[in-house]
Amino acid sequence: MALHIILLSLGIVLLYLGSEWMVRGAASLALAASIRPLIVGLTVVAFATSAPEFLVSLVAAYRGSSGVSLGNILGSNVANIGLVLGLSSLIRPLSIQRSLLRCEIPFMIGASGLFWLICLDGEIGRADGVILLAGLALFLIIGILTARNHVAPDLEGVVRTRKKVRWHLLSLFMGTAGLIAGANLTVNSALFIAHQIGLSELFVGLTIVAVGTSLPELATSVVASARREHDLSIGNVVGSNVFNIGMVIGTVGLFRPMSVDMELMGFEFPVMLFLSIVLFIFSRTGFVLNRFEGLFFVVCYILFVGVSYYRAAG
């Protein structure tokens, strides 16, 4: 047990360092390529921070642990909004770009609703996987089409930044590697500790594994918020939720169809969709996610964990 506590601490340190390197590299590359940081957060950073969810859910599905696989994604998407954005906005209120309200957040809400819909028959099959992957492809196409800035860049600054592209790429790569390694250490250690305590597989997937695989998003968004990179902070969460559904569940459904615990329909799926809609509503009020709204999200997440534990224990 003591060894796993040490490994858990090491994983958290790697997550922090990885997030710091990733935010620096992503923001600098956005300037070098004249790409909006929001798009970098929605795509590159979101893909990298979704890698732990992808690996954990795919391995769990192949091992027949559908509770861990599906619970990981549901719990992670709830944690991304409730815990990650909640804590980030408590640190510093987050400004919201209007483009997020026109496209990306509604797309995330639609993806969450579609995820719930395809699970109503009690199974995620290959056809469902194809649909979700097609939705992710559409999301990426939209991101690419809107990637370029519509304002003239600071050419002198862009030239200076492009000379250091290799270092920014190295920073992005090291950050990604640190996040993945840290997430693996954190999740594996947390799973061992949880099993020693005697928690159920579904609850472990919804909470401990979900929080563990969401730590990259948490670390990245909190660091981005502290560095005033609001576009990366919010874009990372919205993009990660879409990637979790489209890439992770889509791939699992395509290559390893699995059953769905119908008990999730009564609480976990509704909470995921509810928080996505509330994020949209909050974002329209002054285009800022303030500290009170952040506190609301954190409280919602605490209640989510509490109710999930009660349902699992009952």
Image (spheres, helix red, strand yellow):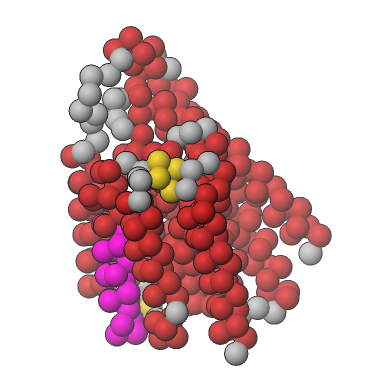
In front of the other: 250 or 157: 157
Q: For the C terminus, which image quadrant? A: bottom right
Quadrant position of the N terminus in the picture: bottom right
Could you tell me which residue is drawn at 69 percent across and 55 percent down?
A: 8
User: Which residue is at a point 73% across and 76% down the rendered structure image?
Assistant: 197
Q: Is residue 19 above or below residue 127?
A: above
Q: Is residue 10 above or below residue 154?
A: below
Q: Is residue 55 left or right of residue 142?
A: right
Question: Is 115 in the magenta?
Answer: yes
* Residue shown at the point (48%, 55%) measured from the top left: 293
Task: Provide residue 96's location: percent of width, then percent of height.
Answer: 36, 43
For the view shown, which residue lies furthest in the bottom direction?
Answer: 314
The answer to whether residue 108 is above or below residue 202 is above
Number of callouts in the render?
Answer: 0
Quarter of the view holding residue 307: bottom right
Residue 180 is situated, as x and y percent measured from the top left of the image, at 53, 48
Residue farthest to the right, as pictured: 2
Give the camera-side residue of 89 and 231: 89
Image side of residue 257 versus residue 213, left or right: left
- Residues in magenta, as a range: 107-124
- State whether residue 36 appears in this view: yes
Residue at the location (36% across, 34% down)? Answer: 37
Residue 254: say if magenta: no
Residue 34: percent from the left, percent from the top?
29, 25
- Which secondary structure type mostly characterizes the magenta part of the structure? helix
